[in-house]
């Protein structure tokens, strides 16, 4: 799908929006229908292929809808989603907004959750007492202590000699 990406394209191509079109016929491309054969743009065979593809997708449960809370069902594509949105009672869930509006809501939710997560992490880090020992200060460093040699046995008087 590199041909749909706007990376490494001339500004003229990006501005003219030709990078979101089919490379063969240059018609706008909102989705891709997999097919082993090329069919002309306005042919009935092409329409049949697209409708068959959409019908197949409509039988697959939407992962966004399934993962959303039951009290507040959500899909970032809204009424433009090709996948199945079905309530627990078997009735189809109908969204009133399309992909443009729902994507904006989805982006704002992601931004809000990331801000909340980073704030919660910052609060946890700032209130956590990292050194549980009362003899250590928060700003202690190793340079404050004089270690004589690499063997701790020099400073331990109560251990029997047999362990060292």
Image (cartoon, rainbow, N blue to C red):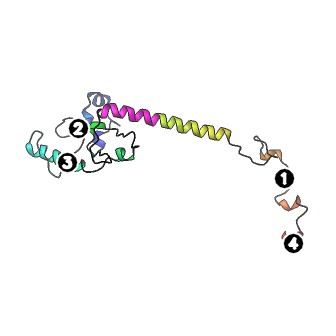
Q: Is residue 70 left or right of residue 133?
A: left
Q: Which mark is residue 116?
A: none
The residue closer to the viewer here, 26 or 127, is 127
Tell me the CA gap for discs 1 and 3. Answer: 75 Å
Q: Mark 2 sits on what residue?
A: 29
Q: Mark 1 sits on what residue?
A: 147
Q: Is residue 18 left or right of residue 126?
A: left
Q: Which residues are magenta?
A: 90-111
The picture quadrant where one finds residue 77 is: top left
Tell me the CA gap for discs 2 and 3. Answer: 19 Å
Q: Residue furthest front?
A: 89
Q: Nearer the viewer, mark 2 or mark 3?
A: 3
N-term-proximal mark, 4 vs 2: 2
N-term-proximal mark, 4 vs 1: 1
Q: Is residue 108 magenta?
A: yes
The picture quadrant where one finds residue 98 is: top left
Q: Mark 3 sits on what residue?
A: 55
Tell me the CA gap for discs 2 and 1. Answer: 70 Å
N-term-proximal mark, 2 vs 3: 2
x, y percentage for residue 53? 20, 48
């Amino acid at each position: 799908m590199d041909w749909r990406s706007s990376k490494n394209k001339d500004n003229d191509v990006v501005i003219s929006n030709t990078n979101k079109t089919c490379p063969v016929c240059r018609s706008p491309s909102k989705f891709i229908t997999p097919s082993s054969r090329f069919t002309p743009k306005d042919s009935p065979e092409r329409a049949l292929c697209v409708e068959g593809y959409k019908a197949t997708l409509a039988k697959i449960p939407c992962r966004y809808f399934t993962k959303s809370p039951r009290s507040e069902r959500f899909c970032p594509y809204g009424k433009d989603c090709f996948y199945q949105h079905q309530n627990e009672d078997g009735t189809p869930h109908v969204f009133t907004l399309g992909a443009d509006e729902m994507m904006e809501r989805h982006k704002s939710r992601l931004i809000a959750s990331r801000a909340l997560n980073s704030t919660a992490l910052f609060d946890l880090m700032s209130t956590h007492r990292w050194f549980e020992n009362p003899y250590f200060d928060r700003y202690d460093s190793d340079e404050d202590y004089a270690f004589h040699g690499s063997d701790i046995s020099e400073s331990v008087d109560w251990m029997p000699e047999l362990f060292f």
